[in-house]
Amino acid sequence: GEDVEQSLFLSVREGDSSVINCTYTDSSSTYLYWYKQEPGAGLQLLTYIFSNMDMKQDQRLTVLLNKKDKHLSLRIADTQTGDSAIYFCAERPDTGRRALTFGSGTRLQVQP
Amino acid sequence: DTGVSQDPRHKITKRGQNVTFRCDPISEHNRLYWYRQTLGQGPEFLTYFQNEAQLEKSRLLSDRFSAERPKGSFSTLEIQRTEQGDSAMYLCASSPSGGGYTDTQYFGPGTRLTVL
């Protein structure tokens, strides 16, 4: 079955880069997503990548995928105080099932 | 363009009462999902509809939980005989038909349930 793990907390200074890491266990082709959740709110989709890709860049966001180690990272360039939130990694195997499996989330704290 | 909406946003109830939540997906999205999120955890999948058909159900969806999507548009999630362990955020998501990236799920703001 699927399992997704993330580190719990990351603190950076405003203007620095943030790197949030995630590992997953599913061995099949899989879709991988990053969501952002602000306090008391729902989840905002940030970006996604399929497991046949190594990298995807979208403005300040860069997703890197190491398929061998099943390791996914989200890099946020020029981190701003508005980036403070919980970031969730999620996967969905390419098996026809639709359920997303989420990690426990990484709380990003951006200090001014 | 309106996103996924959920009603109510907050619900406080006493143990043993029944509650019902509503989700309105993004228009023309034919897939609709329910997740539950407890404090400090990521969302956990409950169930999924394609149009009006309920196609996947998690083991988390006990017999006290029932979800419907009668006309393939909005959906309701009912919890009967609520227990304190049901306290959580209930999230709804929707996605358009098709595979691959077009199946990306967009989430609503959630309904926070507190069972006293």
Image: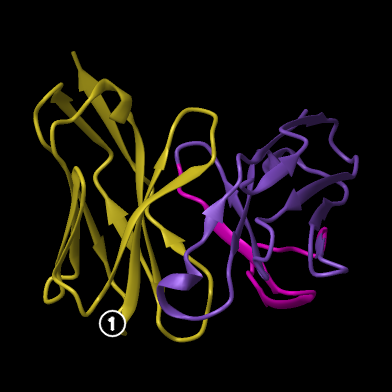
The chain coloured yellow is: A
The residue located at (33%, 77%) in the rendering is A30
**Colour pattern:** by chain
Residue A1 showing in the rendered view: no
Quadrant in the rendering for residue B82: top right
Residue A97 showing in the rendered view: yes
Q: Is residue A36 magenta?
A: no
Residue B29 placement, left or right of A105: right
Please tell me which residue lies in front, B102 or A98: B102
Residue B6, given in percent of the width and then of the height, sits at: 72, 43
The chain coloured purple is: B
Residue B61, given in percent of the width and then of the height, sits at: 70, 63
Task: Please tell me how many numbered marks the rendered image carries.
Answer: 1
Tell me which segment is drawn in magenta. Answer: B41-65
Quadrant in the rendering for residue B28: bottom right
Please tell me which residue lies in front, B59 or B10: B10
**Looking at the image, is B15 positioned above or below residue A99?**
above
State the quadrant of the C terminus of chain A: top left
Residue A73, given in percent of the width and then of the height, sits at: 18, 54
**Looking at the image, is B14 positioned above or below residue B45?**
above
Q: Residues within 10 Å of mark 1 (few under 14, many from 20)?
A: few
- Identity of the residue furthest to the front in this view: B1
**Looking at the image, is B100 positioned above or below residue A64?**
below
Which residue position holds label 1?
A: A27
Residue B33, given in percent of the width and then of the height, sits at: 64, 62
